[in-house]
Image (cartoon, helix red, strand yellow):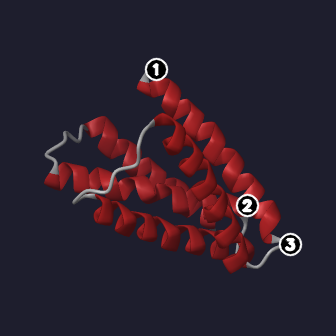
């Protein structure tokens, strides 16, 4: 399947995830919401990976676990923000996380950053300012 289709699927499912997380944040404590959603992710990934391939532990597995812990801290912070702030601002600010891998990709992976990409980043930052005030 083409990467653009996977990207569209991610967009839809992450959009649903963020919306329903906001709804659930009214009824469940932040730490419980993070726990249950992470448990749901773990179950889904375990079933998917278990049926698709044999799970192997190698020298990169520990790094993957660390990356998962980093994502969990981000998820917890996202839920805490959802409880305390408006969805429009929390989603906008938190989804600008894309700037970090773009910058790291340019610096360490030597990926190209065109003027159009740079302009998009600047406009996204302007969007944060406009949505936050």
Disc on the earlier residue, 1 or 3: 1
Please report contact status of discs 2 and 1: CB closer than 8 Å, yes or no. Answer: no
Residue tagged 1: 1
In the depicted structure, whether residue 97 falls above or below residue 25: above
Q: Is 114 left, or right, of 82 in this rendering?
A: left
Q: Secondary structure at mark 1?
A: loop
- In terms of image quadrants, where is residue 38? bottom right
Residue tagged 2: 21
Please report contact status of discs 2 and 3: CB closer than 8 Å, yes or no. Answer: no
Residue tagged 3: 27
Identify the mark at residue 83; answer none if there is no mark.
none
Name the residue nearer the viewer: 58 or 114: 58
In the depicted structure, whether residue 21 falls above or below residue 69: above
Name the residue nearer the viewer: 103 or 67: 67
Query: Residue at 15% across / 54% down in the picture?
Result: 108
Residues at marks 2 and 3, CA–CA distance in whole angstroms: 10 Å
Q: Name the spot of residue 131 as percent of width and height, x first.
A: 62, 59
Name the residue nearer the viewer: 9 or 68: 68
Give the number of the mark in front: 1 or 3: 1
Disc on the earlier residue, 2 or 1: 1
Disc on the earlier residue, 2 or 3: 2
């Amino acid at each position: 399947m083409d990467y653009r289709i996977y990207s569209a699927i991610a967009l839809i499912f992450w959009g649903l995830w963020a919306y329903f997380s906001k709804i659930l944040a009214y009824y469940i404590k932040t730490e419980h919401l993070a726990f249950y959603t992470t448990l749901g992710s773990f179950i889904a990934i375990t079933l998917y990976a278990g049926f698709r391939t044999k799970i192997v532990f190698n020298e990169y597995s520990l790094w993957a676990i660390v990356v998962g812990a980093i994502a969990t801290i981000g998820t917890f912070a996202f839920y805490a923000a959802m409880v305390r702030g408006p969805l429009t601002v929390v989603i906008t600010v938190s989804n600008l996380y894309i700037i970090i891998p773009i910058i790291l990709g340019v610096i360490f992976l030597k990926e190209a950053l065109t003027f159009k990409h740079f302009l998009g980043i600047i406009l996204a930052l302007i969007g944060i300012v406009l949505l936050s005030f």
